[in-house]
Every structure is written in structure tokens, then in C-alpha cells.
Image: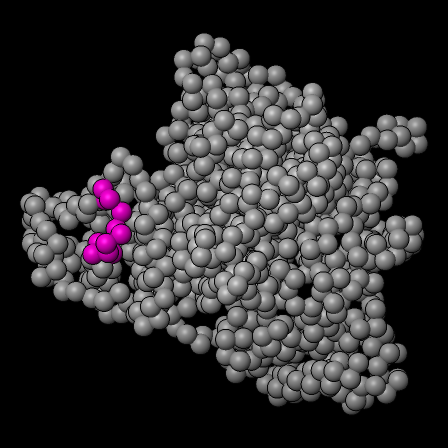
Amino acid sequence: MQRLQTDPSTPSTQGDRWAHLPVDVRDEIDIFETELRRVQSGQMSEKVFLEFRLRHGVYGQRQDGVQMLRIKIPLGILTTRQMMTLADLAEEYSDGISHITTRQDVQFHFVDINDTPNIMRRLAEVGITTREACGNVVRNVTTCPQAGVCPTQTFDPTPHATAMARFLLRHPDAQNFGRKFKVAYSGCAEEACGLAAMHDIGAVAARGVVDGKTTEGFRVFVGGGLGALPYKAQLFSDFIPAEEMLPLAQAMSRVFARLGEKQNRAKARMKFLVGNLGIEEFRRLVDEERGKLPEDERWRDLIEEARGSQEEPLRPAAPLVSETAGKDPDFARWLETNVRPQRQNDYSMVEVFLPLGDITSVQLRELARMCKRYVNDTIRTTVSQNLLIRWVSNADLASFHADLKRIGLASAGAGRLADVTACPGTDSCKLGITSSRGLAAVLNTELEDPMADIADRNDIKIKISGCFNSCGQHHIADIGFLGSVQRKGAYTAPVFQVVLGGTTRANASSYGMVTGKVPAREVPRVAAKLTRLYVREKSDGEDFQEFVARLGKVRLKSELEEFELKSYDDAPELYTDNRQNWQYHKETGVGECAGEVVDQAEFMLEEADRLVFEATLALDDGRFDDASKGALKATERAADALLSTRGLLLSDHYDRIGEFRMLFYETGQFHRPFAENFFRAAEDGNAPGGPDESRQRVEEAALFLEQAQTVYSRA
Amino acid sequence: MDLQKVNVKLFTDAPERIDLDPLLGVFARWREDAASAAGWIDLADYAHVTTGPGVMLIGTRGNLSLDLGQPGPGLLYANKQGLAGSLEERLWECLRRAFGQFEALLSEREYPDGFSPRWGFWSLTINDRLDFPNDRATDALIRPASVQVWDRVFGAGSYTLLPERDPTERYGLTLHSDSPIGAEAIRKTIGTTSN
């Protein structure tokens, strides 16, 4: 494929350097680079490119001219080779930090968009894609990181979640949504790790009886989501057999694509569709759609394929020598907070606590080397922004801890109060109102001192979002903080709303309520006061959620009164944000997390435009065969674009010529001579032609595309 | 091959108590300087990361930080673009930019305590494994150009260069000057540059 070179200093595929990549992956990234150059040279609509780049994981930061790259890590599973590559790329193209997100992805910040094609190619070398990491598509499929080794699991959902991630990636039925679509799997109903209740589709492992046989399946929830208006997922079915999950998700995707809101982005998530239709009607529509789906062998094959790659331990199971723990207090504390037994005897899972989800390239590379020595090949990212190393033989725990210590990753406190979750906030997000990372960093420091007395509590979770979009998941925290502003006189202060009584337990079964508003700089004191209040006044066995319900909003609000925002004259420091000792100004931009609602037809027409352009280049190069083929492909794409506006889905494998003839030619909606050119070219197929025939076919394709764009704009 | 990504690190002493917070204010001020050739974008606060990049000022032309990463703390300038000419000219320009930034930062009143520069201890890393992997071919290209640059600063034969041996790491050379040298002497050779 020939690429535009508008700037010789920008990267290109440089000959056949990337010939070893799978052809479809290579082509996909080449197309991304071509579209990037096209938009840079004004040949492509910025609106379409915005959604196009989001669908490749490239997200505009708050700061002009730099991008955040979100890298999709399905189920949070990373191999050691992938860790090494991420470490290299973060160093060379970002700021040396890999950031683990609350949806098990990895993010790089401050990336030059011109570097993104080569980053994607280097990721592809180790089997990673950024495809559909952002934008109005199916995002990363998340799964509890303990799956397969968890003592409380019903069964291991890993093969099913893996199959789901592979099935929905690039699936034609999942390309025409009005908003993003999130899927999560959980191995059991009790633990917090899957957070199934806050997803568009949440699947919780369950066993059921089918034809008299006990079989694996899932309890399925739909229409959950946080954001400004949090919705708890509703039960779709008590039991869906495991092999039915992929067709069910496909049917739901088709219903969502067909009926979901496309204009008002604030109402476009599936939770609103389920809410408006009612769960009964939604279920009926999904069942009806399921009945229409043509059989797809991938529904079963992908699960079987995923079952073939089960994890095995590297080192033999052996017990921990008990006196080892007694000698080293750091080790003893780490053992207590960061290590949990696996269901397999004498193996443990070790949680590597990453403050704010950040890990340096040196640490990531060294951790990969450690994993090669101690466990087989994989680790998992967690929704609490940490890393989980599984299959550590108990006999190795002491040396594992010592090696972690050597690279600065042996902090105790995973899952404790100090293990705070935070979104990027004003550090990099356009929508950020307050510095959630700044606050998390301050909490991190203060929990060492002066809040050390409460740092090790494992019954309270703190989560911070820098704005109402809830990326820090504050709704499901025991103590959640939501960034906002408050004006007093001529000054504006960063503040946080205090959200109490949510929970991550039982798959995020309950959301908290706003109880008050406090200055950002006071939040550490607020967190300390509420935690100590709980410690002091809780009844036996009462969890924080129950405690909040018992005390009531009035009492809790009164506890927060001492933190009310004072005037600038009395407390100027309250008008600065955490770790930002300059005066606060609210600056927000247009966020990209909702993407642009770009109709699938518009994408296809842009693609047809690119294909015509490439056919023209082929013609200029004397590659007449390529020119003819490209022109026909462009025409077919433009025809598909128009057909998609009539409800035809690519996965239906419809008769393109027949449908186009019936819907556009015979009705006179499309200029007939141009349509006849298309019919003739399709009949000739890819028959090789000389220069004149090729030129004619490219010109006909350009005319067809122009007419298709006119018809689309009239629609 | 278009060499642009070059990291220059000037090692510093490691204080017992690390407090990078003063840099937040300094970099917040610097980023407002729209006229800076560095094209400052924003600061990135990684002070919470053990042995991490510390507090970093991100620019379109390069990043500047007080880096706590391996093999030890130091002032780090990571050039990203804007180099032209021969390899030697590019490395020289990169060193000139780095030195200018380091001097400006060191002259700040709030510069954190304890991170005194060790003017005879530097590293130069090619931050581009794609075009310059850590192998013999890269060594054959980069080392002679580096030697020419360092010779101009320290004088031929007055320093030792240690290459990064791990082929998975980036190509890099660490310099240790055999004789004591100060900022003044380096400034005389390199000149000054604004940030």
C-alpha cells in the first residue's frame, strides 16, 4: 500500500520492516497511517477522523498537540513479552510510565500522534491491539484477575471472556453504536473483582441444569453503568449456558445498534435503552434478534480455542517456611496485605500495589524478568489499578518479596485504605475539573503519616473521579469523591462531593449517595475523620455501607460541617488544588470519551474515498490491476454505506447487487448510469484490464462515490 | 535514519530525604513561557513513583525532569525532535539544549536540596530502539560521534565511556570524567542557551 508522505520526518512503514505482521493487522495500521496523513493534509473530515482514531485507541489529551494512547489488554492478561514491549514503548514514545486503568487497560500519555502507527505496529508484534480501546464500540472485556485461581469461584470464566473479547473485536454488528459498550465477567457472585453490575453486559459464573445435565453458564445482567447518571444493571437471565453467551452478545449488539440513541450522547448508553424499553421488552427484542442470527461456528470455536491456553505453574508447589515471615516485619506486613492463597494448594497470588496505577519502564521490564523466573508467563492487571502475579509457589514468597523490594514494588497495603483508585483528572483529561491524581498522591503520602493508624483497613475503599463522568468509579466506593467547583466571592475553589455508602462488594452491588461537599485540600482530613468515625462507632460486624445507612445523611453531613469552604481571605490555600500550589482556575474542554456519533455509513463512505484515492495512486504507478481492484472495492464500500442506511448489516451477508438494484436503482434514487457502471464492473469482477480500462473503472468509482455521498446527504 | 530521540542525563547526588515538590512550582511557572523554544506543554507529576521520572516538564521539543530512575538520580533532558545535520551535530545540539535546561533549573531558588550535580558524570541514551537498536551497528554509528562531542567538552582521553551491555535496553553510553570539572568549564565549551 502506498502512503502519503506529507512530512518526511514522520514515521512510515519503511519498506518491508513490518512484513512479518499478519496481513490484516498490517493493513489495518497502514490504513490508520494513511487516514492520519489524509486528515493532516485536509483530505478527510476531522469529525470522522476523531471517531476513527478513537476506535484505534488514540485519545486527545487536555493539553494541545499530544495524545493519550489506550492499549487494550483483554481480561488484563499480559505475557512477559508484552510487558517488555510496553516498557520499551513507554520509554521511547511516552514519559516512561505505563498507567494501569480501572478497566484493565494500559495507557501512555503525552504521545505524538505521528508516532502512533509505529507504536501500533510494535504492539502488534506481541499480539496487542489498540483497536476499539476508545470510541463508540465494545471496549476492553474485563474479568476478575483471580479467575482460575480464586478459592471462591464457581468456575474459571477466562476462556469465555477471552472468546467474547475476540468475537466482538471488529465485529460488523458492533460498529454502529451511539456510545461505548462495556462487558465484564466475574467468576463468582460474592467478590468485588468483576464489578459485573456496573456494565452494559455483566456475566457472573453460575451452574445450571440443561437437558438434565449440570452445565457451566452465566447469570447475565444488562444496562449497568456509572457516569453522571449511574444505573445498576438489571437481571437479564438467571442462567445463560456458556456457549450461548457469544450469540447473545451479538443479538444485544444488534438491538443496541438499531434502537440505541444516536443523537443525544448523554442518553446513548445501553442503560438508557434498557431503562426506556423496560427489561421485559428488551429481553423480547434480544430473543427475537437471536432467533434471526445465522449460525456462526466461531460461537463455539473461539471458546474451544481459548480453553487450549490454560495457565500452568512454573515452580513446584511447596509450603512457606514459617520462620521466614517472622524475621522481616516488611515481609510479614506484605504477606498479610498483598498475598492471598490460591485454590491450588501451596500457591499464592501476589498483588503488586502501584500507587495511582503507575509503573516505570524499568520496573515493568524487571517484573517481566521476575515472572519468567517465578511463574509461567502471564500476569493480570486489576480494576483497582494494580498487577496480580499468580502461581507463585509459597516457598518462593520470601525471595519474590526481596526481588520486588529491589525494584521498588514491594509496597504493602494492596486492597487497603491506601490503595486508592483515581481517574486521570486534570492531569491529562479534557473533562477533568479537579486533580484526582493529585489528591490520590496526597492520600498516599498521608496514609503513611499522619493517617498510618487507619492505612491498613481493608473494609473501606476510596475512589476518586475528577468529574461527573465517574472514570474513578466513585459511586461504588465506600468513600467516594467526585470533583466539582465552588465559587465564593471572586474566587473559585476545587471541591469534591463526598459520596458515601457505595460498595464494590458482590460485583458492585450498590451505589453511594452524595452527602456533602468539601474543599479538595481538605479531603485527606475528611477521609481520615470518616474512617475513624467508623472505627469508633460501628457495631459488631457492621460494614461501612450499613454504618452509613444507620447513621443517616443528616448526622454524616454534620460531621462534614467543619470542612466547609472558607473565604479566600481566611484560607487562600483552599483555592488551590492538591499538589498544585498555584491558584485554581476551572478549565475544561470537550471530552472525547463519548466520541463523535458517526454513522456507520459515514465511515464506509470515508473508507470508499480512501480506496478511490489509493486506486488513483496505483494508476499513477502503472499498477493497473491494483487500480481496477481498488476501484471496485471502493464502489462496493459506497454501495454498502447506502445499504446500511436501510438497515442491512454486513454480517447478514446480503446480496449487494440485488439489494442495491431494488432499493436504489429501481426506485430511481441513484443516478442510473452510475449504478449500471457498478453492475457491469461487479459482473466483470477483478478481471485484469489495461491502462484505459483501469482508468475508466477508477473514474467510474469516483463518480459512484460522489453520487453515493449526495444520496446519503439527502437521507 | 533520522536521529531525534536522545536522552542526556547529568547525574546528581542522592539526598537522604527526597522532596521534589519545589519543582511543581518551578515547572508550573516555566510552562507558561509561550516563547520558549522547548514548546512546554505541561508538567507531569510522578513524585509518587519510587525510582520513577520524578516531576517532569513535558515539551514538544523535549522533556525535562529530575529523574530518580536507574542508574541513579539526575537531571534528564529527553530530546524528541528538531535535530538536524550530522550525527555529531545532532548530539552536540542535544547536549547544548540539555545543558541550557539544566543550568536554568539549577539556578532556580526552589531547586530541591541535596541534588547537587556531578559535572563529570553523564549519560547519553539513544531513545529509539526501532532505528537504533543496542547492537554493533548502532555502536559503530553513535560511538564515534559521541566521542567527538565529549572530546570537545572534556578533552580527549580525560574520561571513560561505558556502553550499556544489555541488548534489550536502549543504546547508551555513560561517561565518567577522570578529572574534576565544573559547570563553568563546560559552559565555556558548550555556551548557553535559553529554555
Vertical comparison of B42 with A79: above or below: below
Residue A679 seen in the current view: yes
Between A197 and B112, the residue placed more toward the observer is B112
Residue occupying the point 88% across, 78% down: A662
Residue occupying the point 80% across, 86% down: A670
Horizontal and vertical percent for residue A72? 58, 50
Horizontal and vertical percent for residue B167? 33, 43
- Horizontally, residue A518 falls left or right of residue A4, namely right
- Magenta residues span B105-115
Quadrant in which residue B83 is drawn: bottom left
- Magenta stretch: helix, strand or loop mostly: loop
Residue occupying the point 59% across, 71% down: A49
Vertical comparison of B173 with A667: above or below: above
- Horizontally, residue A79 falls left or right of residue A344, namely left
- Horizontally, residue A655 falls left or right of residue A573, namely right
Q: Quadrant of the C terminus of chain A?
A: bottom right
